[in-house]
Image: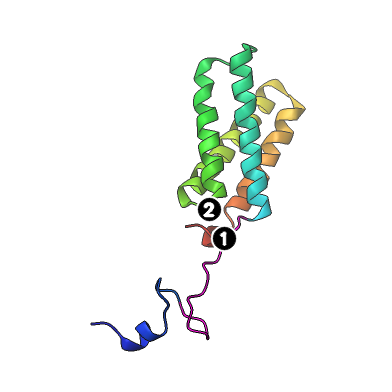
């Protein structure tokens, strides 16, 4: 059975009707600026890998898998998909672990900085306020 009050209070698309009887416009969801920054960071890493593989300067072709993974995570996170968030979260956790391992074994300060940056990104991505905005 349908509720007659529900039908009277909704517009043509099933959204709540405004006072004039027209359907309310769909609200556009914009990702938070920090999530945009994380997505651009992943895109930058992906492009760095592609350039490194194509130019032949130290990256094996198998690393293109990581580039595809980072680009997919970037797109999914920008569209606020839960799977994109999970991929971005996995990417920053793995990158943080890798960079801390590089720092521990080779004592490169740049790896410590990048590992710390990835840890900050991880701490932002696990915030409940961000997870509530995902689809």
Secondary element at image label 2? loop
- Estimate the x, y position of residue 128 in percent, counting from the top left: 56, 61
**Mark 1 secondary-structure assignment:** loop
Q: Quadrant of residue 42?
A: top right
Point out residue 80 in the picture as x, y percentages from the top left corner: 53, 53
Residue 30 versus residue 59 in the image, above or below:
below
- Among all residues in the image, which is located at the extreme top? 56
| Range of residues picked out in magenta | 16-31
**Residue 129 picture quarter:** bottom right
Does residue 50 sit above or below 97 in this rendering? above
Q: Tell me whether circle 2 and circle 1 mark residues in contact (CB < 8 Å).
A: yes
- For the N terminus, give its image quadrant: bottom left
Q: Quadrant of residue 2?
A: bottom left
Residue, x 58% and y 58% (percent of image)?
Answer: 130
Residue bearing the label numbered 1: 29
As drawn, is 135 to the left or to the right of 44? left
Query: Mark 2 highlights which residue?
Result: 80
Q: Which dot, 2 or 1, sits closer to the camera? A: 1
Q: Is residue 98 left or right of residue 17?
A: right
């Amino acid at each position: 059975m349908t509720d007659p009050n529900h039908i009277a209070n909704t517009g043509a698309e099933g959204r709540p009707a405004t006072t004039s009887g027209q359907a309310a416009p769909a609200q556009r969801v914009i990702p938070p600026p920090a999530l945009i920054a994380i997505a651009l960071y992943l895109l930058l890493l992906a492009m760095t890998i592609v350039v490194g593989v194509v130019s032949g300067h130290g990256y094996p072709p198998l690393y293109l898998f990581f580039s595809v993974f980072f680009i997919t995570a970037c797109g999914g996170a920008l569209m606020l998909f839960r799977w994109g968030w999970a991929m971005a979260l996995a990417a920053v956790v793995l990158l943080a672990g890798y960079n801390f391992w590089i720092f521990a074994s080779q004592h490169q300060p740049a790896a410590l900085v990048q590992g710390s940056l990835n840890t900050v990104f991880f701490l932002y991505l696990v915030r409940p306020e961000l997870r509530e905005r995902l689809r």
